[in-house]
Image (spheres, rainbow, N blue to C red):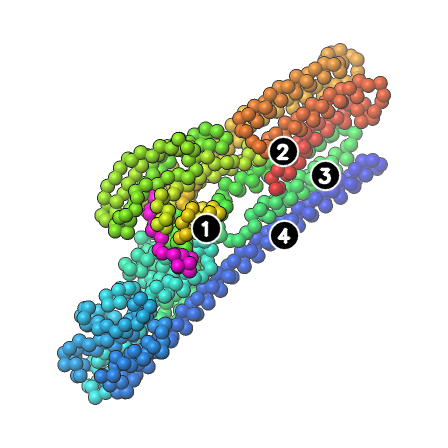
Amino acid sequence: MRPPSGFPRLVFALATCCALTAFVAAALFAWADYRTRVLATESWFERFQAQAAVAAEQLDEDLVRLSAIADDLALDLSLGEVPLDQLEARLAEVVEQNPYLFGVVVAFSPEAEPLSGQLYAPYWVKRDDRHRLIQIEDFYDYTDADWFRAGIRSAGWINPFFGEASQTMVSGYCAPFQLPGSAPAVDGVHDGTVCVDYSLEDVRELVTALDLGPTGYAFVISSDGQFVSHPQRSYVRQGLTLQALATQLRDPQLRRLAERATDLRSGAIAYSNELTGQDAWIFFSPIPVPQWSLAVVAVYDEVPLNLTHHKRSQIVVTIGLVLGLCAVLVALASYRLYSQRVLWGSSVGIALVFLIGIVRIWSVEFVEVGRDPPDSVMLVDSTAMENYLADYRRQLEEHSIGEPLLVPTGVYIEAIRFETPHDFVVSGIIWQRYESPEHDDLERALFFPDAVPDKDVLRPLFRFRDGNDEVIGWFFKTTLHQPTDYTRFPIDVRNLQLRVWHPDMERGVVLVPALGDYSLLHPTALPGLEAGFALPGWQVFRSFFAYRFFDYRVSFGISEIAKDGDFPELTYNIVVRRNLTDAFISNQVPLFVAAIMLFAMLMIDTRRQEQASLYGFTTSRVLGTAAAIFFIILLAHIDIRRRYVAEQIMYIEYFYFITYFAIVAIAINAFMLAGPHYSRFFHYKDNLIPKLLYWPLLHGGFFFVTVLIFYR
């Protein structure tokens, strides 16, 4: 059904065109934003899958070369081409031709005829980047070692173990041999074995060199699930298996990964760490020769999405939907364009649509609560932290800087109080763990670089020995200066940072979070905050440790310190969002009351003498009331400026500015309505048009400034 002909039909046509245009534009922007995010995520997935496959292939090629060396040497020994008195020279020739080898050993069984019950195992092993010849029998009875027992029976790869002779974690490939003239092997036991070692540090260097983002990491497991390489070195040293880790963590997703990876399958699984709250994808690829598997863990939060572009796209979509809905209401009103009830319904509806649009943009802005702080790496997982520190160590090695000294540090916050708009007081307990003997000569101290002078309390609280470690705790109360941008007040999110430094800066001390001292690390579980912690006027959403990167632009006179923003500065972060209820009750109520009063003044504006007498309407009274409202709002506005001392114009101030314009508009309307000259805009049906436009224009102005502020 079409609206009546004439002006209503013209209004319908224009409104319909505007609605269709707005909705199509909103849909296109939403689709473009969705596709951009999907393509970025897919590209990210493909990159990690490709890196996992390439690394697995490279590792497989390295291990094929190693196994070929052992097989060739074992064959030469079986054929008698390497006399016993020339064996050590032949081993020297092997390591000279293959300098990447970590070690190669020929271990004889005491029952072999040439040895007459003696042990003999010459071993060329790399130490201090040079190959040296040692005799394994000088260190221990190798005939009791698992690698020897397996190696004299069949060829194959040996699970990782700590080599007492090499003094490092190694894995290796062993091939048995039977000396010429010897009796055939009994029960599969041969005269000896040739083993080529592969240092697990080499595996670690290969997988840590992958570009996996700030906290992504990779690990390698053997055919039975034992860790060959992992950022947590203790997993490898303890001979831990992925199955055992899954059982320990009660994690069915890790158990499923262990089943698929040990079957030498490739693929990917979605993984959610219940302890840390991080979502990730784990890509795994087989390494065929040793029957190992390489897995790459990619943290989903590190997908390189342009969050600013996404936010702006969402705002543009909101604009399109708001304008489209307003046009729809106008089109519907065109069917009964001369009915005041319909016009008032459309007026209120349009105002509500603008209000919903404002709330929608606020919700988009509140996504900031879930973002990681800029120029920082969140630390909620010990494995990811170890992987990041491995990258940092590699950077130090490239600049010939020594190994950093890691000091575990924990924080427990008991209270926070905002003292000024840019300063807050925080108190609680902070502790550090000093390891012996590495930290014996380190000063037992710390400080907060953001502390306001003369407002810093650090009092010893406890000190005790925990095995070889010394644990020291302090009670602290300090006022921290943290400049804050109030441009978006009261729709603002703050990240309260406690920056912690160690005074021995010239020693290369790096503070690391004592993650093991917390039962839960999920940021929304608020680790490090006192149970029931509350901050009046704010909602606490997350707490976590992070490394902050900042270019100090000075070296502090210490040449060994990182000066380009790469030095990991430990921060404890608390993300809070202003309580909208408190903010609006204290700041918006005067504006809301003023808007109602202005509308009431507008509604009693009339040229009809009997109604004017009834309401007491006169232009002078309207001007006087408008002036009174203006001064009340002005005092509230001044109070906000006084309380927050913002250098910029705050978001909420635009609401005051719009209210000032509304006051002026109401005064002008009263003057024009009472004027002697007829104006269709002011006089049509006794001031109906300004009355209908009041709420849509007021909320439209609020919507416009909301877009203006939050689109930036």
Q: Mark 2 or 3 closer to N-term?
A: 3
Q: Quadrant of residue 315?
A: top right
Residue 406 part of the magenta segment: yes
Q: How far apart are the two marked residues, 4 and 1, measured between alpha carbons?
A: 40 Å
User: Considering only vertical position in the picture, is 576 above or below 155?
Assistant: above
Q: How far apart are the two marked residues, 2 and 1, measured between alpha carbons?
A: 49 Å
Percent of width and height locating residue 388:
41, 54
Q: In the image as oriented, which residue stretches furthest toward the front? A: 557
Q: Do the residues under discs 2 and 1 have CB atoms within 8 angstroms?
A: no
Q: Nearer the viewer, residue 700 or 546?
A: 546
* Mark 1 surroundings within 10 Å by alpha-carbon count, few (fewer than 14), some (14 through 19), many (20 or more): some
Percent of width and height locating residue 100:
36, 72
Question: Which type of secondary structure does the marked residue at label 2 adopt?
Answer: helix
Image quadrant for the N terminus? Answer: top right
Percent of width and height locating residue 131:
30, 72
Q: Determine which of the numbered discs, if any, sits on residue 355 in the image.
A: 2
Residue 97 part of the magenta segment: no
Q: Which residues are magenta?
A: 393-411
User: Considering only vertical position in the picture, is 401 above or below 136?
Assistant: above
Amino acid under disc 2: Leu
Amino acid under disc 3: Ala
Residue named by callout 3: 327
- x 41%, y 73%: residue: 61
Q: Is residue 4 left or right of residue 478?
A: right
Residue named by callout 4: 32
Q: Mark 3 or 1 closer to N-term?
A: 3
Q: How far apart are the two marked residues, 4 and 2, measured between alpha carbons?
A: 26 Å
Q: Nearer the viewer, mark 4 or mark 3?
A: 4
Number of numbered markers = 4
Residue named by callout 1: 563
Q: Do the residues under discs 4 and 2 have CB atoms within 8 angstroms?
A: no
